[in-house]
Amino acid sequence: MQGEKSSLFYEYVRVLKETKPRYFLLENVASMKPVYREEITKTLKEIYPDTECYFIDSSLVSAQKRRRLYWTNIPGVEIPQDR
């Protein structure tokens, strides 16, 4: 998966490995190919086994329609309720 467009993701992974934060949050477009979503999830789970991926459309909580994927290991994350 490493390519020109994925270089920022792998830089993020490098920083996670070096700094070892307790929690992390990563956001990306929801329209990505499933194979990329799976690769991101797999890579993050290698560092943080409790990583989950959430689909959230910001129109649930704002006037903007912005479909996004969020990966995190923050406990207790819930999908926002429709406003």
Image: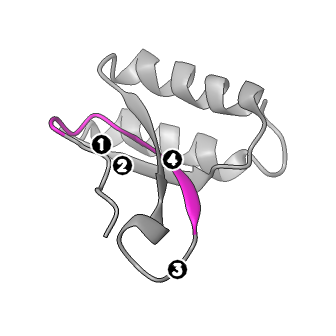
What's the magenta region?
66-76
Q: Which residue is mark 1?
A: 19
* Left or right side of 16 for 20: left
Amino acid on which disc 3 is placed: Gln
Secondary structure category for the residue under label 2:
strand
**Which label is found at residue 64?**
3
Q: Earlier in the sequence, mark 3 or mark 4?
A: 4
- Split into 4 quadrants, where in the image is the C terminus? bottom left
Q: x%, y% of residue 77? A: 23, 42
Give how far apart the Cα atoms at labels 3 and 1 are: 33 Å
Q: Earlier in the sequence, mark 3 or mark 1?
A: 1
Q: Which residue is mark 4?
A: 12
Disc nearest the viewer among 2 and 3: 3
Task: Judge whether residue 31 is colored magenta.
Answer: no
Q: Is residue 8 above or below residue 82?
A: above
Amino acid on which disc 2 is placed: Leu
* Left or right side of 32 for 64: left
Q: Locate residue 34: give its quadrant.
A: top right
Label 3 crowding class (10 Å Cα cut-off): few <14, some 14-19, many 20+? few
At x 47% / y 83%, what residue is drawn?
Answer: 63
* Left or right side of 38 for 77: left
Q: x%, y% of residue 73? A: 28, 34
Task: Judge whether residue 67 is colored magenta.
Answer: yes
Q: Earlier in the sequence, mark 1 or mark 2?
A: 1
